[in-house]
Amino acid sequence: MIWVVRQFITHQILEVGGEGVRFPVRVEVEYPQEKRKVSAESLRKKILYNKAFLLKQYPELKEHDLDLLVEEGVRKAIQEHLTVSGGVE
């Protein structure tokens, strides 16, 4: 078994006040891999984006809603990444 660390950038689109805002999200995933299989339970992730700027720029935006949007987008991006690079158990 080996530990794999991958970093990538994905983009989220946020609809605020009739305007679509596209912003980058840096993702780092770390997981053990054995025979090209990855256990979803052992996956660790770090998410980095400029939340403070977005909340300041768009005061009508709720922090919880932004967190949910980013989390869902990152989950999909990680799933795509793992599908391409090896598969998930």
Image (spheres, rainbow, N blue to C red):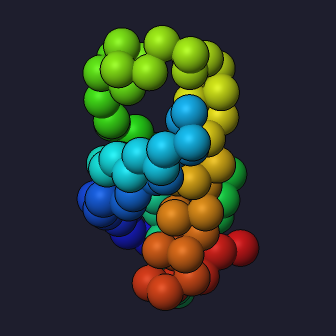
Residue at image position (71%, 73%) is 89
Residue at coordinates 34% horizontally, 47% vertically from top-left?
Answer: 23
Position above or below: 53 against 70: above
In front of the other: 31 or 51: 51
Residue 51 is situated, as x and y percent measured from the top left of the image, at 38, 24
The residue located at (35%, 20%) in the rendering is 57
Q: Is residue 29 visible?
A: no
In which quadrant of the rendered image does the N terminus lie? bottom left
The residue that appears at 57% across and 82% down in the rendered structure is 83
Residue 39, image x and y in percent? 64, 64
x and y, in percent, of residue 54 in the image: 38, 25
Comparing 4 with 7, the one in front is 7
**Relative to residue 42, is residue 47 depicted above or below?**
above
Query: Residue 56 sits in which quadrant?
Result: top left
- The quadrant where residue 69 appears: top right
Q: Nearer the viewer, residue 84 or 13?
A: 13
State the count of labels. 0
Residue 36 in percent (x, y) is at: 51, 85
Q: Is residue 86 visible?
A: yes
